[in-house]
Image (spheres, coloured by chain):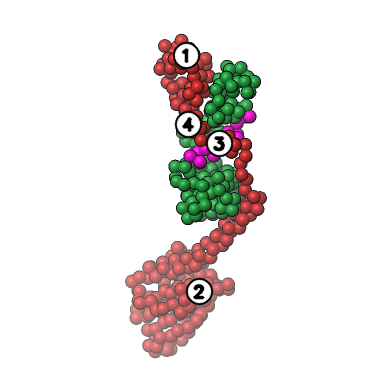
Amino acid sequence: MGGMNGCRDIQPLLGMYALGRLTEREMTALQAHLDGCPLCRIEAAELRGVAEALVHADPERVEYRPEPPPWLRKSVFDRIDGARRRTRRRAAALGLAGLTAAAAAVTAFFLLGAPAAPDGPDTPTVAYSAGGVRASATLTPRPWGTALHLSVSGLTPGQNYTVWLERPDGRRTPAGSFTAQGSTRLVMDLSSGMKPHNATALGLSVSGGGPPILRAPIPRP
Amino acid sequence: MRLRRSAERTRLDDEVSLRAAYDEHAGELFAFAERSLGERALAEEAVRETFLRAWRSAARLDAGEAVLRTWLLAICRNVVIEHACSRRTARVADGTALERLLTGLQVEEALRRLSPDHRAVLVELHVLARPPAAVAAELRIPAGTVRNRTYYALRALRLALEEMGWEA
C-alpha cells in the first residue's frame, strides 16, 4: 500500500507528524505509507524523539546565553596547575616510599623488625639481614644524590667494608666505607652521587674486592 | 583502525587539549551552571571544579569530541547537584528538573547551530505552539513551505544534536 505514495512525497509530512500537527487526511495518508515502509517508520520515530526534546527549549534562552567572564579561563588553569604541582610532590614522595616498600618485599626473607625511621615519614627505611649480618638503611633523595643512613652489626671486627649503590647496568657507585668494631652496632651517615631512583640495589662488600656481604635489589616501582 | 582511533582520541591530560576543551565547551558549561544555580559566581566556581575533575580523571577518557562534550556536561551536572545540595540558593530543586533543564539547554545549543529559517519555524510552531497557518503568515511563506521546512529543520536539529553527542 505504501507504494501508492513514494517516500519522497511522503517524507515532508514526517516533520509535522513528529510535532503532532498533521491534519486527519494527511495522517491517514502517512499512516498508510508507514505501515509498508520500515525506513520511514524509523525516521518518524527519530524525529518524534527530537520533537519531544524540543519542548524543553526556552526560546528566550536561545536568543541569549550567559557567557563566562574572560578571566575565568586563567582561573580554571591556575587551579589545575596548583593541583598538578601538588600531585607531582606527592608522586615523588610516593615513588620513593614505593621503592623502599618494594626493596623490603624483595629482601623479605632477611627481614627484621624495622627500626624507626630517623628522619620522619618521608625517609624510607629498609632493614635486612644475611649470614649473621644485620643492617638497616634509609635512602633520602638529595639535590646532589642520595643520603644514606646505615645501621649495621654482626660484621668481622677490624675489617674494612664498602657500601655501594648499584645501577641497572650492574656498575656500583661507592657510598662510603667504614671499619667494623666487634659486635657493636654501627650507625653512620653516608652519601652517594647516584639518585635513589637510579639505584637498582644497595649492598655491602669487603673493601678491596670480593663478593657482596649483602645485596638488596631495589626493583622499580 | 587502531591508529585512526588513537589519532582521533582526545587526551585531556595534555595541556593543549585541555585548553582546547575549555575554549570549545566552557560557554555551554557556564550557561548550564548559571541557569541551574542562578548565580554567576557559583557558575564560575562550578566551571573551575568541572575542569579540575576533568583533568584528574582524564586518563579514563579515550573518546572523540562529541563524547568529550557529554562527559564534561555530566561532570558539570554532578558539580551542580553537589552545589544545589549544599546551598539552598539553587534554582534546581530536584534531579528531574535538572535533567529537563539539561535537555532544554542542549536543544537550545543545537537550535543555535541551525539556520535562522530552520530555527524560526521550529520555535514558532513547536516551542511557542502557534498554528501552522499563523506561522506561515508570520514568516510570510506558503503553508506547504512551513511543512517542508519543518521536516528539514527537524532533521537538521537531529543532526546537530547527534554532533553534540546526543543519544536518542
Do tags 1 and 2 sit on the same chain? yes
Residue B27 visible from this viewpoint:
yes
The residue that mark 2 highlights is A140
Nearest the camera: A197 or B118?
B118
- Say the numbered circle drawn on residue A25: 1
Mark pair 1, 2: CA separation: 86 Å
Q: What secondary structure is found at the residue carrying circle 2?
A: strand
Q: Position of residue B52 (x, y in %)?
A: 54, 54
Q: Nearer the viewer, mark 3 or mark 2?
A: 3
Mark pair 3, 1: CA separation: 32 Å
Mark pair 2, 4: CA separation: 64 Å
Residue B59 visible from this viewpoint:
no
Q: Chain of mark 2?
A: A
Tell whether position B110 is magenta.
Answer: yes
The kind of residue tagged 4 is: Glu
Mark pair 4, 3: CA separation: 13 Å
In primary-sequence order, the first of circles 3 and 1 is 1
Badge 2 crowding class, 10 Å Cα cut-off, few under 14, some 14 to 19, many 20 or more, is: some
**Where is A98 relative to A46, above or below?**
below
Q: Residue at x 47, y 42 (%)?
A: B97
